[in-house]
């Protein structure tokens, strides 16, 4: 009997998780079914409970429910606790477990590109939930200095204040987008600005050797600006595949090779 998995969100039809997990299953010989599940905005908990009550094995969580999933769990991994959000659920002995694989997905994608992380200096643009979810895994992968730039400086400062005790081995700094300058190994865009058409103008005083866009599948002004500077660029499909591989490994005990899927 095949195992049942799902990705839950609202909207959900755009999710590429089913094709990824079915590709992993074909590569590894795991017998599974993976479906999209649309939850009403006010019906997330009921949808999760129903899924696991009907022999569901594991569930991925996408927008806008990651914080609700965090609150719903009986047990959290360390990285989920630090991220304050959950994107991977499973049930064991009647308890709902939650993890956040987004940050590890980003780390694995960057490492697959052979971009430097050990002793690196990283810039992340944006101080929202996407940024919070990747700081701990990035530092554990060897990042030495991490600067968070945000339109509202106070929000970046609040994020650093909340997380600095979790990664004492790294330097965390905040700055406003207006103050953005310096030299970085990798610049990461964690905002939706470059996709929505809102201006995200990178100043000439900012220098970086690689550019990573967390989003995927759409034009990105961030990547366009980076490409004009002649630096290597990547969109976020590798991160998407990487976080999916990490979830697949949690559920099935087998870890596909990311290089086979990007």
Image (cartoon, helix red, strand yellow):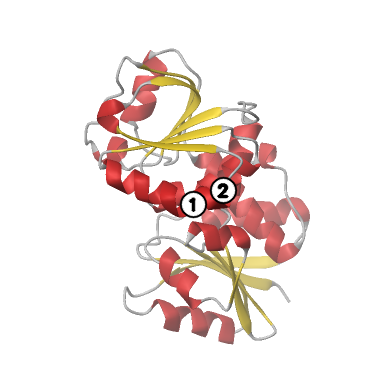
Q: Against 118, is 22 above or below?
A: below
Give the image location of residue 101, x and y in percent.
58, 55
Residue 241 makes an appearance in the image:
no
Q: Residue at x 36, y 21 (%)?
A: 181
Image quarter (top left, top right, bottom left or bottom right) of the C terminus: top right
Give the image location of residue 212, x and y in percent.
47, 32
In-image side of 174 versus 193 (left or right): right
Helix, strand or loop for disc 1 = helix
Closest to the observer, 164 or 37 = 164
Q: Against 41, is 217 above or below?
A: above
In-image side of 192 versus 44 (left or right): left
Q: Residues within 10 Å of mark 2 (few under 14, many from 20)?
A: many
Give the image location of residue 198, x and y in percent.
22, 36
Q: Which quadrant of the figure has residue 197?
A: top left
Closest to the observer, 243 or 29 = 243
Sequence-wise first label, 2 or 1: 2
Closest to the observer, 148 or 98 = 148
- Do tag 2 and tag 1 residues touch (Cβ < 8 Å)? yes
Give the image location of residue 46, x and y in percent.
43, 84
Q: Residue at x 50, y 48 (%)?
A: 164
Which residue is at the far left? Answer: 198
Q: Which mark is residue 163?
A: 1
CA separation in Å, label 2 and label 1: 8 Å
Mark 2 — residue? 136
Q: Residue at x 67, y 41 (%)?
A: 258
Q: Which quadrant of the figure has residue 215?
A: top left
């Amino acid at each position: 009997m095949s195992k049942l998995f799902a990705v839950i969100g609202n909207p959900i039809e755009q999710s590429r998780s089913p094709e990824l997990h079915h590709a992993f299953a074909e590569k590894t010989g795991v017998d599974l079914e993976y479906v999209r599940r649309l939850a009403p905005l006010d019906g997330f908990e009921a949808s999760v409970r129903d899924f696991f009550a009907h022999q569901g094995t594991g569930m991925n969580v996408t927008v806008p429910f990651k914080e609700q999933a965090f609150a719903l769990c009986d047990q959290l991994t360390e990285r989920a606790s630090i991220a304050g959000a959950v994107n991977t659920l499973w049930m064991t002995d009647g308890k709902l477990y939650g993890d956040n694989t987004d940050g590890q997905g980003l780390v694995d994608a960057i490492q697959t590109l052979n971009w430097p992380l050990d002793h690196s200096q990283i810039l992340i643009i944006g101080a929202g939930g996407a940024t919070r979810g990747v700081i701990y895994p990035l530092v554990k992968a060897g990042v030495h200095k991490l600067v968070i730039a945000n339109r509202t400086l106070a929000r970046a400062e609040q994020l650093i204040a909340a997380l600095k005790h979790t990664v004492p081995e790294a330097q965390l700094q905040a700055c406003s987008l207006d103050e953005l300058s310096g030299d970085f190994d990798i610049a990461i865009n964690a905002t939706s600005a470059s996709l929505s058409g809102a201006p995200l103008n990178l100043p000439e005083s900012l220098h970086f050797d690689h550019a990573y866009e967390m989003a995927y599948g759409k034009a990105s002004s961030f990547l366009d600006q980076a490409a004009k500077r002649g630096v290597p660029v990547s969109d976020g499909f590798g991160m998407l595949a990487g976080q999916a591989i990490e979830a697949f490994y949690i559920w099935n005990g087998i870890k596909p090779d990311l290089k086979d899927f990007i």
